[in-house]
Structure formats: C-alpha cells, structure tokens
Image: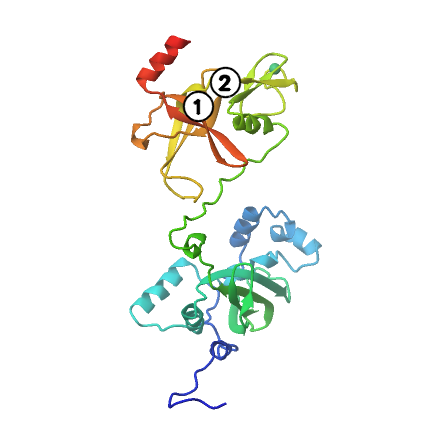
Amino acid sequence: MSSQGSAAPRESLDDRLQAFVGLSPGPSYPGPSEVNLPMITHWVEAMGDHNPVYADEAAAREAGFEGIIAPPTMLQAWVMRGLRASQLTDDARARGEEGDTNHDRLMGVLNDAGFTSVVATNCDQHYVRPLVLGDHLQANSVIDSVSSEKKTGLGDGHFVTTRMEFTDQHGDPVATMQFRILKFRPRPKADEVREPGQPAERPKRPRPALTHDNRFFFDGAKEHKLLIQRCTNCRTLRHPPRPSCGQCRSFEWDTIAASGRGTVYSFVVNHYPQVPAFDYPLVVALVELEEGTRLVANVCDVSPESMFIGMPVMAGFETFDDELTLPVFRPVSKAESTEQSRER
Ligand code: ZN
C-alpha cells in the first residue's frame, strides 16, 4: 500500500482496536475476603435461594461436598474490591499518581470514534470446582476480543469481550468468566433528525392495560362519560374496576355515569423523572367524586402552587390520540361552584 504525501499511513480504527487484544485491561488484585459464610448468607437471602448446601454443613456433606459451598454465581463477589478501594484509586488518578489502564485507553479510542454508549450484553461463567469456605480468589483479566463494527438494534458498535481467569490461593484455576459489552453509537433522538421548522413528533402516552373488567371505563371516556362500576345486587359503587363486589361478593355489575363533580382528596406534583409524553410539572390528584368513589387523574389549567386538598374540581375529557381519551380535572372557581350548586 502506498501513502500519499509525507504523512505516515493512518492506522485504521480496526487496527487500533485489535492492538488491545491480549492485553490486561487493568491491574488485578486479590479478593478482599476469603470465601465466608456471612457473605454467602446475605447472598442466598437476597436471592431467595434456600438450597441447604449453602448453609448447612451436614446437608452439604450429604450432597457429596467437603463442606458448605458458595453459590457458583457468587463468583465475582469474591474479587470485588468494594467502594472504598475504588474511591482511593479514583483519588490517586485525580492526583496523577496512577495512569490510564488499557481498558480506559480502549474506551477512549471507541469514544473518540463516536461509540459513546455502552451496554453489557453477555456474561458466561464456567466453574472448575465448587468454592468452599476459606478459598481465597484472585482474578486475572485479558481483553479477549474486539469485534469489527456490527449493526445492532441499539445502533452500530463494537463488542468488547473480557476474559477473567479465577484462581485460588494455590494458583489453581477455579473458574473463568467471559464478559461482553457493546460500545455503540447512540442513534440521534427523533427531535434531532427532523427538518428545521418541523415540529417534533411527540411519543404517545402509555396505554392502559385493558381487561374485561376495566374496558368500560376507557370506552366511556371516549364518549366523554365518567363511568363508575356498580354492583347490581347491593348497589355499592366501586373504583378502580374489579370483578366482584367487596360488600356482597356478587360478580354482577353495571355502570352509572358520574356527574364529574368532585374534590381533591390528595395530590402530588411530579417534576422528575420526566417522560416525553407528559407536560411538567404534572399535577396528579386523587379525586373524590361526589358519588363517593375516588380516582387518580391529572389536574389541568392549575398552577401547582395553587393546588390544595379539598379543592373543588370538575371532570372534562382530553383526547391524546386515536386510541386514548382520559378524564382530566380542572379547578372549579368559587363562582362556578356556586352556580353549579344553584343548578342542582
Ligand atoms: Zn354488592
């Protein structure tokens, strides 16, 4: 291959990535603790794993082990250095006392090429023998492979596979682990690819999970009716919808249309996290209808500061898209509420 001009031929991205294969991603440390029963006990309780070979010496021997064993999937826990050690390393690097690792440099090359997002994709563990109390592990890692650029559902990127070899206090292998990440180029967000001047397409509101029991409520909303489920046996009203009456256990029900008048029983003002389908701050209230049932709904045309418990509200309906119409509430001004009570 001939190069033009005086500059040296530029190394391709793939060449630069392949140069990391076979290198250690960073220093390895012995595990901070040997395999021990308290850590195993915490793990199995968190996981809800009640296998007695992790807790009971006699049961473990009965099962053919030399004593209590550690759950195999706890493997990595025995070499995790913990928060304090990681912070000390971060501090040392901030002072310039510790340089970048090969892992850092590899991530830097990928970041500079635009593959700035990361997701873990695979973790495969192979066990040579069960770990028993008193084993003291160390893991040595190597960058096993870096793939060429692949197209994935998340975006184009490179898979980086790290292989860890776990050894015991005698230096004998006990397990291996292959851990793979995808470093990918994030897709531009919808509002970054639109033509100038064209409004961003807004994601739709989440759909309700429709069931045989609750469908009437959402169908009613499409017709601008606020429906409440009623037991046809004892006439008790209930909401949210459910199959049977809490008073008399009857499965027979019909619905009545609520007046829409209610009061704020409780409310929250949601600022964060923000979902693009909603406007913020988002006022979410538990509204007590004059019929006696309560429902959760948004309150519109109100400043969060002016919300109060006991606020009179009136139902309206908002159509968000072809499939979704929901009741929303608006504050009833004092004048309107007087007017309404006169009409009643
Ligand atoms: Zn009933």
x, y percentage for residue 196?
38, 54
Task: Count the numbered circles shown.
Answer: 2
Tag of residue 279: none
Q: Amino acid at mark 2?
A: Ala
Q: In the rendered structure, are the residues bearing label 2 and label 1 in contact, judged by CB atoms less than 8 Å apart?
A: yes
As drawn, 25 above or below 133: below
- Crowd tier of the residue under label 1, counting other residues whose Cα lies within 10 Å: few below 14, some 14–19, many 20 or above: many
x, y percentage for residue 204?
49, 42
Pick whichever, 14 or 88, lies toward us.
14
Mark 1 highlights which residue?
Answer: 315
- Residue visible at 53% across and 70% down in the picture: 149
As drawn, 190 above or below 324: below
Q: Amino acid at mark 1?
A: Ala
Mark 2 highlights which residue?
Answer: 258
x, y percentage for residue 121?
55, 61
Seen in the image, is 209 located left or right of residue 268? Answer: right
- Residue visible at 39% across and 90% down in the picture: 5
- Residue visible at 35% across and 30% down in the picture: 301
Pick whichever, 224 or 37, lies toward us.
224
Indicate which disc, 2 or 1, sits on the residue closer to the N terminus.
2
As drawn, 73 above or below 45: below
x, y percentage for residue 338?
34, 12
- Crowd tier of the residue under label 2, counting other residues whose Cα lies within 10 Å: few below 14, some 14–19, many 20 or above: some
